[in-house]
């Protein structure tokens, strides 16, 4: 059996594109960002194509740490169920915390939403991650819309979105712009084919064949029994001569209704 396994492994063709997108990495493809001034853009300040298929949404814990080289990189906790970020932040000295927007210190570990998107025409992959209130509102609205749509069509469809802009009211900053996912279409799951129109079944509505009514035949009257010949009639019959053969041949067969086999 071991020889068979070795043979099967050596004959398997691998083209370098096999694998899965769920490989444990948080960031896949190109990172896209949102801010008030530039709105949607990538890390090179280039515009993001649209529309995009929302492939998946997940939640992680994220903090920013500095490497020995002085670079700031993200650190993630991805194993679910996620731990309470407050418990994780208690393990980090307050001297390592960063200043917050409202004054005070910003906790290192934050609940972060991660949205994976795909450009349908090219297969290009994008990752959007954010811990802001505006991003949470955008993702919550998208999740709710998808849940309602799936309930209506009874299928795990995925949304196709255009990256848009919304607003929300902040207690500290008033009306604040935020990202938004505008649904423009839906894509069925890979296991479900596109629905095809069904033609009506005409067999149940077809007109049944009409059978001709049986011809009504009247019963033939029974023939009266032959009358008994008297002695005078017998004598007359003997005196009659038979017709010659020419008279029988002259009868038109189309008007001769005698049964030939009797």
Image (cartoon, rainbow, N blue to C red):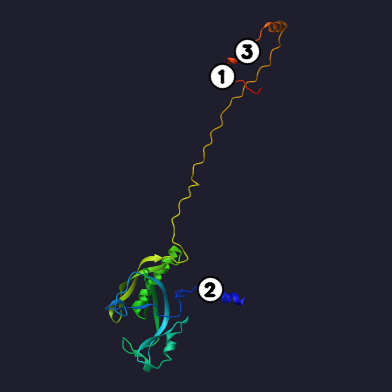
State the image coordinates of residue 46 (x, y, percent, origin top left): 29, 77
Label of residue 11 in the image: 2
Q: Nearer the viewer, mark 1 or mark 3?
A: 3
Residue farthest to the left, as pictured: 37
Q: Nearer the viewer, mark 3 or mark 2?
A: 2
* Label 1: how many Cα within 10 Å (few below 14, some 14–19, many 20+): few
216 up-or-down from 53: above or below: above
Query: SS for tag 3?
Result: helix
Q: Is residue 176 visible?
A: no
**x 40%, y 70%: residue:** 144
The Cα–Cα distance between marks 3 and 2, rounded to whole angstroms, is 101 Å
Looking at the image, is mark 2 or mark 1 earlier in the sequence? 2
Q: Where is mark 3, residue-wise? A: 245
**Depth check: 18 or 246 in front?**
246
Query: SS for tag 2?
Result: helix
Looking at the image, is mark 3 or mark 2 earlier in the sequence? 2
Label of residue 255 in the image: 1
Label of residue 84 in the image: none
**x 42%, y 73%: residue:** 56
177 up-or-down from 245: above or below: below
């Amino acid at each position: 059996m071991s020889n068979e396994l070795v043979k099967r492994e050596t004959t398997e063709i691998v083209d370098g594109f096999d694998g899965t997108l769920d490989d444990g990495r948080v960031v896949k493809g190109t990172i896209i960002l949102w801010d008030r001034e530039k709105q949607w853009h990538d890390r090179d300040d280039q515009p993001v194509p649209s529309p995009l298929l929302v492939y998946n949404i997940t939640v992680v814990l994220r903090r920013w740490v500095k490497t020995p080289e002085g670079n700031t990189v993200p650190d993630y906790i991805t194993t679910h169920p996620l731990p309470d970020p407050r418990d994780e932040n208690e393990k980090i000295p307050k001297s390592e915390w960063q200043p917050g927007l409202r004054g005070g210190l910003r906790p290192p570990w934050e609940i972060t939403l991660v949205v994976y998107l795909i450009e349908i025409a090219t297969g290009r992959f994008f990752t959007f991650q954010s811990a802001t209130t505006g991003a949470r509102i955008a993702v919550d609205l998208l999740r709710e819309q998808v849940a309602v749509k799936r309930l209506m069509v009874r299928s795990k469809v995925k949304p196709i979105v255009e990256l848009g802009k919304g607003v929300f009211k902040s207690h500290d900053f008033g009306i604040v712009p935020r990202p938004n996912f505008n649904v423009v279409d839906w894509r069925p799951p890979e296991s479900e084919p596109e629905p095809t129109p069904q033609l009506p079944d005409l067999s149940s509505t077809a007109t049944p064949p009409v059978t001709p009514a049986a011809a009504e035949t009247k019963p033939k009257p029974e023939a009266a029994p032959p009358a008994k010949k008297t002695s005078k009639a017998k004598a007359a019959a003997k005196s009659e001569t038979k017709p010659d053969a020419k008279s029988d041949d002259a009868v038109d067969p189309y008007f001769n209704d005698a049964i030939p086999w009797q």
